[in-house]
Amino acid sequence: MNPADGTVIAQVTEADAAQVDEAVRSARRALSGEWSRLGIRERAARLHRVADTIEKRFECFVQAEVADTGKPVSLARKLDVPRSAANFRVFADLVKMAGVEAFQTESPDGTAALNYAVRKPLGVVGIITPWNLPLLLLTWKVAPALACGNAVVVKPSEETPATATLLAEAMRDAGIPNGVYNVVHGFGPGSAGEFLTRHADVDAITFTGESRTGAAIMQAVASTVKPVSFELGGKNAAIIFADCNFEEAVNGIADAVFLNTGQVCLCAERVYVERKIFNSFVDALKRKAEALIAGWPTDEKTNLGPLISAQHREKVLSYYELAREEGATVVTGGGIPTFADERDRGFYVQPTIYTGLAESARCVKEEIFGPVCHVAPFDTEEEAVSMANDTKYGLAASIWTSDLKRGHRVAQQMKVGITWVNCWFLRDLRTPFGGAGLSGIGREGGIHSLNFYSELNNICIRL
Ligand code: NAD
Ligand code: 6OD
């Protein structure tokens, strides 16, 4: 469905259990075919070719991403499609460079040995991904899984089926053997997602999505003891000190709150601002929110798209209502924009800023996943750290200050997987990525991805 006007774009076939099984068997077969005989260099070369193909068909991927999500075309061009090609390049290069551990062993009785580890594929990896950055998050997992020699069965979100399908064409064109990359479409519970997690011949599950879906998947994989990697939800904090570069901080927080209509797991929904600059910061952020252009996704000037679906809009609007009930002051937004054209049938909401909520309010505690934040003042560094850490989630934080000593000090106290200082969503794909608490299990990125997507076999040779 086109989130900008609610029209149906395409029909997608929902895979039943037999089709998921066929996909898993296809992946298993591929593991004993040509794919298993390629050396690392050739595997890496083919992943570079996948990246080349994405770049060659750049506009096709952009159009598919926009059709899937309703995000502004400028964002798909700047973020999603280039990052997807980069995911293949980075993991292709990394797998060629990655070493293994080796130890010279001396036992107390004088026996000497050499221990070294070799990296083997896990086998068939099930990959389940969400709708917010569908191509970016899918390739973030497919690329390292293939780099390590696995075959994959992917189950993209039911909201965003197009780019995963198009990627299959890129795989074929890049010479990835049949069966190495398999796509099944469908929903989660009682559908393709659950069939994949429960399949006895799937060796591992890597999942990005909501924390409670992570819990359901964990139960599903328990009986077959599959390794899991979970990248889950967040309720991320930003801390803005009075000594920050004001303009950079306002621009950075406007991105951190409103990018992709707030549908990025790393978005800041809790903004803590030192009291001395609180009023001026809220005013400046309000101006930023009100300057956003909620246009058609295909219009180059648009920088605020619709939410993904009617159902998700209901959820976000229920929090807008709850915020009022909880006593919030509405600085801006809080409703639905009107356009007097077809967009009135789409899933837009106004970018929204609240102040005045208690820290215990549900709107301050629960992930909303829309273009919305609550801004609260603080007086001391300790108070800011304590409020930022007062959450069951632990994905990301950002700190804004000119005092780098303070930047390090506060960053090191954040109970999260990633802390940015004077920036947000600035990525280096070699770094560990993941969350604490309800935000996930494990780390991906760089060597962490290679470690998850491979089985290490330690070999001990008596000398
Ligand atoms: P979701 O959990 O509803 O769905 C994600 C995927 O899981 C979809 O493909 C869905 O069909 C599938 N699924 C749902 N129930 C399932 C089940 N029981 N078994 C197997 N598969 C199942 O998430 P969403 O609404 O698509 O995405 C938004 C959420 O994802 C937010 O909470 C956001 O914070 C989170 N997210 C986290 C990260 C991260 O890196 N930590 C990144 C992006 C999104
Ligand atoms: O940048 C990444 O690698 C990543 N996994 C981003 C996640 C964004 C969440 O919506």
Image: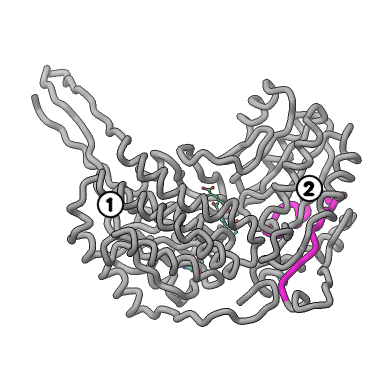
**In percent of the image, x 76 and y 42: which residue is there?**
251
Check disc 2 and report the residue beneath it.
359
Let me know if residue 94 is in the magenta part.
no
Give the percent coordinates (x, y) of residue 218.
44, 60
Q: Residues within 10 Å of mark 2 (few under 14, many from 20)?
A: some
Front one among 163 and 457: 163
Q: How is the image coloured?
A: one colour
Q: Main secondary structure of the magenta part?
A: loop
| Count of numbered badges drawn on the protein | 2
Q: Which residues, given as a range, are shown in magenta?
A: 346-370
Give the percent coordinates (x, y) of residue 400.
73, 33
User: Label 1 near label 2: C-beta < 8 Å?
Assistant: no
Q: Is residue 395 left or right of residue 384?
A: left
Q: Amino acid at mark 2?
A: Glu
Q: Residue furthest front?
A: 56
Q: Is mark 1 within 8 Å of ligand 2?
A: no
Front one among 185 and 70: 70
**In percent of the image, x 74 and y 57: which residue is there?**
371
Let me know if residue 366 is in the magenta part.
yes
Q: Amino acid at mark 1?
A: Gly
**In percent of the image, x 16 and y 27: which residue is there?**
114
Which quadrant would the N terminus be assigned to in this image?
bottom right
Q: Residues within 10 Å of mark 1 (few under 14, many from 20)?
A: many
Q: Is residue 244 left or right of residue 411?
A: right
Instruction: Assign a secondary structure to mark 1.
Output: loop
Q: CA distance from mark 2 to mark 1?
A: 47 Å
Name the mark on residue 149.
1
**In percent of the image, x 91 and y 41: which residue is there?**
279
Tell me where residue 6 sits by quadrant: bottom right
Instruction: Assign a secondary structure to mark 2.
Output: loop
Which badge, 2 or 1, is on the more N-terminal residue?
Answer: 1
In the rendered image, is residue 228 in sight? Answer: no
